[in-house]
């Protein structure tokens, strides 16, 4: 009786150990996961004209803001409007006045795949502010700006300027030596900042002209106009570069011997966990076999 009671549990334990060892293989494989990569979309924007002006009126103590823009777009968009008018309460009885008129005024912003791009073109343009309906703040032949951002490459920003412009009726030569100041007695002054460009590892920005305006028209009920005017602006941000596939990233960190071992295991239907699973199964089977031997010896005695 004693040998029978010992022998039966030993056999059952050995069988259970074998079953557990065989089941460990699928369980180890089930723990493997998959990696997912996402890709950024990039951005692009452009504007032919943007104003940030404060207009002081003769019969009021408050300022009237003039914040308008022409052909301001974000990818994927384009615009080709060549004239801009505005109106302010208290200026010429609220009648619309011309802010900009041009022969060509184009803005375009696109994002395609791994490339984002923005560009502007302005030519044959005349810019006005309230209170100066006949005298242009600036007249120019042609300016343009461009910003290109491509994934994995250095962004690029560029500007094209004419040799000269006319500011408050005066012809001014444009140079890269710094800002240009123009002052007209009884009218006011304008400061021109030329060809501003900048890039980072993923972004680019270009502005053809930025004007700081301070004029005193004393006409059409306008006492003073101050602020900034930006012409031909383009900006972009590169799309994110596609992430490397997870399989390639894993392979890069495996030593040659480990790589060969995993390749051999793949050919036989196993993986890197197979040696450990197999070793565990052998150990369990050996333990079970030892239990059976001991059981038989006990029965013989």
Image: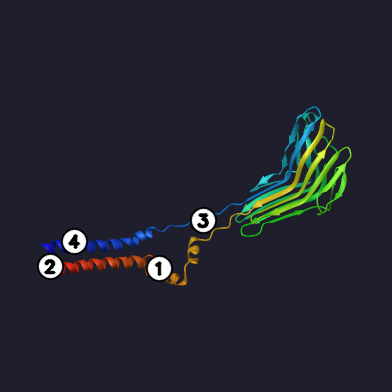
Q: Earlier in the sequence, mark 4 or mark 3?
A: 4
Point out the residue furthest to the right here: 185
Please name the colour scheme applied to the rendered image: rainbow
Q: In this image, 275 relative to 50: left or right?
A: left
Taking depth in this image into account, of 295 and 144 the one nearest to the observer is 295
x and y, in percent, of residue 49 in the image: 74, 44
Q: Quadrant of the C terminus?
A: bottom left
How packed mark 2 is, by other alpha carbons closer than 10 Å (few <14, some 14-19, many 20 or more), is some
**Distance (Cα) linking label 4 and label 3:** 53 Å
Q: Earlier in the sequence, mark 1 or mark 3?
A: 3
Per the image, label 2 sits on a secondary structure element best described as helix
* CA gap, disc 1 and disc 2: 46 Å
Question: Is residue 135 visible in this depiction of the protein?
Answer: no
Marks 2/3 in contact by CB < 8 Å: the verdict is no
Is disc 4 in contact with disc 1, using a CB cutoff of under 8 Å? no
Closer to the observer: label 2 or label 3? Answer: 2
The numbered dot on residue 37 is 3
- 1 or 2: tag closer to the N-terminus: 1
Which label is found at residue 299?
2
Percent x, y for residue 293?
19, 69
**x and y percent of residue 230 in the render?**
75, 45
Helix, strand or loop at label 1? It is: helix
Task: Point out the frontmost of discs 4 and 3.
Answer: 4
- The residue under the point 36% across, 60% down is 28
Which residue is tagged 4?
Answer: 9
Could you tell me how far apart the alpha carbons at marks 1 and 3 are, in whole angstroms? 25 Å
Question: Mark 1 or mark 2, which is nearer to you?
Answer: 2
Give residue 266's mark: 1
């Amino acid at each position: 009786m004693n040998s029978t009671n010992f022998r039966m549990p030993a056999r059952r334990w050995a069988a259970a150990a074998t079953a557990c060892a065989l089941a460990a293989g699928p369980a180890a494989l089930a723990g493997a996961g998959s990696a997912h990569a996402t890709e950024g979309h990039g951005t692009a924007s452009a504007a032919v004209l943007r104003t940030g002006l404060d207009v002081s009126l003769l019969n009021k103590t408050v300022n009237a803001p003039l914040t308008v823009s022409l052909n301001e777009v974000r990818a994927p968009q384009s615009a080709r409007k060549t004239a801009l008018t505005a109106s302010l309460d208290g200026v010429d009885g609220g009648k619309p006045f011309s802010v900009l008129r041009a022969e060509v005024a184009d803005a375009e912003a696109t994002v395609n795949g791994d490339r984002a791009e923005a560009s502007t073109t302005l030519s044959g343009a005349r810019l006005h502010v309230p209170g100066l309906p006949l005298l242009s703040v600036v007249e120019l032949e042609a300016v343009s700006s461009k910003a290109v951002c491509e994934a994995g490459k250095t962004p690029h920003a560029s500007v094209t300027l004419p040799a000269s412009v006319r500011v408050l009726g005066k012809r001014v030569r444009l140079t890269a030596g710094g800002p240009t100041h123009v002052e007209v007695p009884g009218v006011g002054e304008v400061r021109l900042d030329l060809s501003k460009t900048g890039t980072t590892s993923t972004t680019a920005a270009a502005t053809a002209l930025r004007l700081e305006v301070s004029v005193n028209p004393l006409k059409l009920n306008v006492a003073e106009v101050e602020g900034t005017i930006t012409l031909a602006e383009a900006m972009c941000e590169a799309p994110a570069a596609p992430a490397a596939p997870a399989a390639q990233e894993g392979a890069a960190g495996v030593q040659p011997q480990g790589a060969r071992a995993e390749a051999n295991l793949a050919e036989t239907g196993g993986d890197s966990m197979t040696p450990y699973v197999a070793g565990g199964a052998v150990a369990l089977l050996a333990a079970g076999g030892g239990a059976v031997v001991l059981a038989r010896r006990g029965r013989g005695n």
